Amino acid sequence: METPATAQGTWLSAEEAGFLKAGPRRAAETVLARLIDTGLVRVSRDGLVSAVHQDDHGATTSVEARLLSHAQTPVRFDMIVQSIARSTEIADLYRHLFSRRLMQVPRRRGEGWWFSLAVAGLLTLAGFVSPPFFAGVPIALCFSFLQYGRSPVTKAGKAALKQVTTHDRVHAVALHGFTGKAGGRNVSELFELPQSVVKMIPPKSRKPGKRSHSDGGGGGAASSCSSCGTTSSGCGSSSGSSCGGSSSCGGGGGGD
């Protein structure tokens, strides 16, 4: 299912919305949610995910096909999410969002960005006394801008994401994750999954003082494939080691 995201015609699939919201792992959760929703996989009470059919029957995307193939034998709930998050197909999803200019290469906020801004202010004040000081203001502002950081989600991506709603339970996962809440209800309840199962997915860790600018305006997008650069060169490996894994691409925003 796809959702019209803006009046200008930007459309987001549920997994695209999940990726923009919280990175590769959220996108993987969203794909799993859709396959549960369509009855193509089952989740046992002890958290084992298994495909209903012994082939890729019913898959509508390459990511769904990968998950169904992986679930031919029962797989733990958290393990299948992590495996799909690291897959080449999820890396392709990132590249697709990048090509649509919904994502960009992020910059981590430097700890001294405010110092450059303060220097610019002091140079401005000094310039009123001695005009040559004004020449240093643009340089200081430039340093401050470069150190301030940049979200992995572009303005267009943020605008598209704002239009996505929890109009069904799959989109509830995209926006809030299996462990989140939508409309005052646990999202897991929408799928009749016990908390013991969804809590197999570990929460994202945050290191104090290492918070990047990408934690902000993008609604918690992946921190996000910064190791992948601007092209597919770092993202296309079949192992997904440089993109798609929670280690390099999923540690971003405040999503899961």
Image (tube, helix red, strand yellow):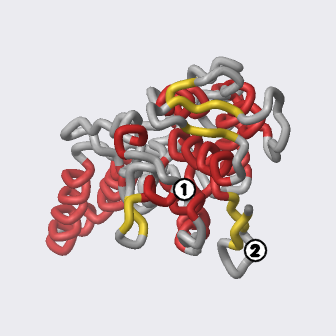
| Amino acid of disc 2 | Gly
Secondary structure state at the residue bearing disc 1: helix
Residue at 38%, 66% in the rendered image: 185
Secondary structure state at the residue bearing disc 2: loop
Tell me the tag on residue 9: 2
Residue at 24%, 35% in the rendered image: 207
Residue at 44%, 57% in the rendered image: 189
Q: Is residue 71 left or right of residue 145?
A: right
Q: Residues within 10 Å of mark 1 (few under 14, many from 20)?
A: many
Residue at 60%, 24% in the rendered image: 74
Q: Residues within 10 Å of mark 2 (few under 14, many from 20)?
A: few
Tell me the tag on residue 188: none
- Residue 30 horizontal/vertical position (percent): 59, 49
| Amino acid of disc 1 | Ala
Q: Quadrant of residue 118?
A: bottom left
Q: Nearer the viewer, mark 1 or mark 2?
A: 1
- Residue 217 horizontal/vertical position (percent): 41, 62
Res 167 seen here: yes
Along the viewing direction, whichever of 134 and 207 lies nearer the viewer: 207
Compared with residue 89, is residue 211 higher up or lower down, i.e. above or below?
Answer: below
Looking at this view, name the residue that lies furthest to the bottom: 7
The residue identified by callout 1 is 174
Nearest to N terminus: mark 1 or mark 2:
2
- Residue 245 horizontal/vertical position (percent): 52, 28
- Residue 251 horizontal/vertical position (percent): 41, 37
